[in-house]
Image: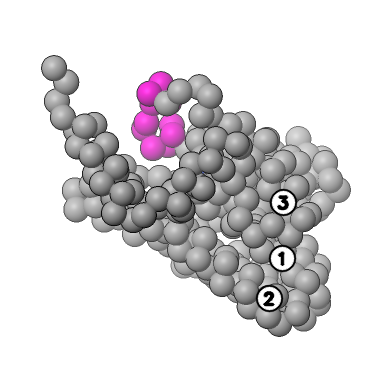
Amino acid sequence: MVTGASSGIGEAFARRLARDGFQLILVARRRDRLEQLARELGGAETLAADLALEPDLARVAARIASAAELELLVNNAGFGTKGRFWETPLDGQDRMHRVHVMATLRLTRAALAAMVPRGHGGVINVSSVAGFGQSPGNVSYCASKTWMNSFTEGLDLELRGAGSPVRVQALCPGFTVTEFHDVLGMSREGIPSWLWMRAEDVVDASLRGFERGQLFVVPGGIYKLVVTLEKLAPRWLRSLAVVRASRRRRRPAG
Ligand SMILES: NC(=O)c1ccc[n+]([C@@H]2O[C@H](COP(=O)([O-])OP(=O)(O)OC[C@H]3O[C@@H](n4cnc5c(N)ncnc54)[C@H](OP(=O)(O)O)[C@@H]3O)[C@@H](O)[C@H]2O)c1
């Protein structure tokens, strides 16, 4: 099952997993996109669902519970918001936590309940490099992705502690060319071209890491470097750099 399969990284997962011979269950809100993709893949089950809505989420969790042979769950559905926490409509931030946190929690629980007794399978949670730190204007996004990283790491410890071969991964991409920034209403122009990755390369890195049992996968050399520096720098230095950069961005031009 791939959530958020109607575009971007989720669609790239679906195309790659179909090539690898998986039978797919594709989840997202845009039914037409899912059905078109299913046709292109030569057949796949589609589940149109808004993962921020309780009845839809319960329906997707029930589908997982009834999929006795579910081999892989990719919790990929997600989106960004921009603006200061107290100035941004609560609704978008509330929905973000429902999709990034509650849907990941519920669907992972439904999947592992069958995978662990069966002794095989895995879950990939599509997080972000944003999950390794915080940035003004992105507070809920960073916090919900940090939760995904911590949740996945905790599951890994529990699974390994229980001697289970079931694997989990937190996939942490940087800037990737998808519809993410269009949905956000953010131009890609301010971001240098060498920072952008292709969704297909992000997916290849994830599945390579999955084969090796890698818990955190950060695709691309530049982002591996950024995450390493972020981990090495003391918190006070990171905070100082982030606050200075955000003040510079907000200073009126001229
Ligand atoms: N692109 C980047 O630069 C980047 C970087 C780091 C991490 N990520 C993460 O990668 C994941 C995929 O994003 P993307 O870059 O591929 O963006 P995208 O092209 O906008 O795809 C997002 C997917 O999530 C689905 N989705 C959003 N809200 C949903 C909801 N309430 N219920 C069900 N499905 C929902 C969308 O489908 P519908 O609209 O049809 O529902 C779409 O299929 C996200 O979790 C994102 O945070 C992206």
Specify few, some or many for label 3: CA neighbours under 10 Å numbering under 14, 14-19, or 20 or more.
Answer: some
Q: Position of residue 102 (x, y in %)?
A: 47, 66
Question: Of circles 1 and 3, which is in front?
Answer: 3
Q: Is residue 205 left or right of residue 98?
A: right
Element under label 3? helix
Q: Amino acid at mark 3?
A: Gly
The kind of residue on which mark 1 rests is Arg
Above or below, comparing residue 19 to residue 233 in the picture: above
Which amino acid type is shown beneath numbered disc 2? Leu
Q: Position of residue 191 (x, y in %)?
A: 42, 26
Q: In this figure, which residue is indicated by the disc labeled 1?
A: 167
Q: Earlier in the sequence, mark 1 or mark 3?
A: 1
- Residue at the far top: name it: 254
Q: Secondary structure at mark 1?
A: strand
Residue numbers of the magenta segment: 181-190
The answer to whether residue 4 is visible is: no
Tell me if 250 is positioned left or right of 174 in this view.
left
